[in-house]
Image (tube, rainbow, N blue to C red):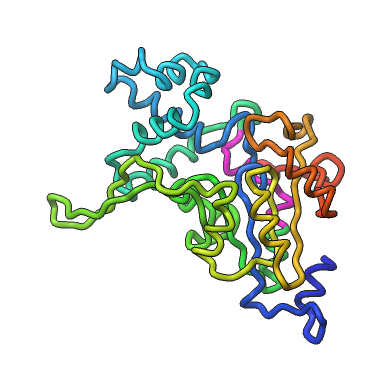
């Protein structure tokens, strides 16, 4: 609140005009839960299981064999190559409209295995309040996430109040073609084009926003370059980390986690004096009240 007051008070040495009040947020683990696996990965796994009857050979092919047998260690062992194979099998040939429909319908019925709630209810109440507070003070809020742009855009506006054009994420190749009905359509190729994580986050900010943000919020080492980039700006800025240390109300993880690992970033935050928000100590509430 002190930072917002400084950058919004006209006449202040730290005043930043509204058009330059850009705030960027990671999504997975920063705005909603990312354990025990990224929500988009859960969606892709469900897609593979639904498509499996059409592909009997998958029973003997990794990473599909691991998915069908619920052996996530086998899936993880296939690495990025396995994830790209999953992406291709789940999305290739779908129109962007069909993909949007698929994601929307899945989110309406899917439930988190631990909390038994829709994933869009497992967003963080304090972060929703922060997004609203910033926008009320003239900030433009963006998502800069390793998650897929097409996966996030169908639901983020209703959930976070962030319009789809302010969502920057990983992208895959899409091809324009005219359908047999004479109508144009965009076809997903199932090939990853850009992974918006790590060093690519500042690249994406420069490419799609074109302004240096003055606030950045993340939760993992994958967000560290974004925080380093924003903290280097010439204007007054604020960068923050969310530390998952509440096993009772959510999850406790940092340096050894397979998802949302926070190791080097935690050290850098302490070294530079960046605020580290403790979910356990600083948040009265984690998730919104059940709808």
Left-right relation of 29 to 6: left
- The correct choice, above or below, for 86 with respect to 179 in the image is above
In the image, 143 versus 238, the foreground residue is: 238
Q: How many badges with numbers are in the image?
A: 0
Observer-nearest of 177 and 154: 177
Characterize the magenta stretch by its predominant secondary structure: helix
Residue 167 location (% of width, % of height):
52, 57
Quarter of the figure with the N terminus: bottom right
Q: Nearer the viewer, residue 291 or 275?
A: 275
Which residue occupies the extreme bottom position in the image?
11
Q: Is residue 180 magenta?
A: no
Q: Which residues are magenta?
A: 117-129
Residue 85 screen position, x and y as percent:
38, 30
Residue nearest the observer in this picture, 51 or 14: 14
Check the picture and name the quadrant holding the C terminus. top right
- Residue at point 67% right, 43% down? 221
Asked if the stretch drawn in magenta spans residue 128, the answer is yes
The residue lying at 79 percent from left, 36 percent from top is 245
Quarter occupied by residue 256 = top right
Report which quarter residue 219 is drawn in.
top right
Query: x, y percentage for residue 77?
Result: 51, 21
From the top left corner, tell me how far across and down residue 159 is, in percent: 58, 52
* Residue at (51, 56) in percent of width and height: 168
């Amino acid at each position: 609140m002190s930072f917002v007051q400084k950058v919004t008070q006209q006449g202040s040495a730290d005043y930043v005009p509204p058009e330059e009040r850009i705030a960027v947020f990671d999504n997975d683990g920063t705005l909603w839960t990312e354990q025990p696996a990224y929500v988009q990965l859960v969606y892709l796994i469900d897609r593979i299981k639904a498509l499996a009857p059409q592909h009997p050979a998958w029973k003997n092919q990794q990473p599909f064999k691991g998915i069908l047998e619920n052996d996530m260690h086998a899936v993880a062992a296939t690495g990025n190559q396995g994830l790209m194979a999953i992406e291709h099998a789940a999305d290739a040939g779908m129109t962007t409209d069909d993909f949007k429909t698929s994601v929307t319908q899945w989110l309406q019925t899917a439930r988190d295995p631990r909390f038994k709630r829709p994933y869009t209810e497992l967003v963080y109440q304090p972060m929703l309040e922060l997004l609203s507070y910033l926008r009320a003070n003239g900030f433009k809020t963006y998502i800069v996430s390793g998650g897929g742009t097409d996966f996030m855009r169908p639901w983020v506006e209703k959930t976070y109040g962030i319009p789809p054009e302010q969502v920057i994420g990983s992208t895959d190749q899409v091809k324009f073609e005219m359908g047999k009905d004479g109508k144009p359509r965009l076809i997903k190729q199932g090939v990853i084009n850009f992974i918006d994580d790590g060093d690519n986050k500042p690249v994406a900010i420069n490419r799609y926003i074109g302004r240096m943000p003055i606030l950045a919020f993340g939760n993992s080492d994958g967000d560290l370059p974004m925080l380093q980039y924003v903290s280097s700006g010439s204007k007054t800025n604020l960068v923050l980390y969310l530390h998952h240390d509440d096993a009772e109300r959510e999850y406790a993880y940092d340096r050894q986690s397979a998802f949302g690992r926070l190791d080097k970033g935690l050290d850098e935050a302490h070294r530079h004096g960046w605020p580290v928000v403790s979910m356990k100590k600083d948040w009265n509430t984690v998730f919104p009240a059940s709808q």
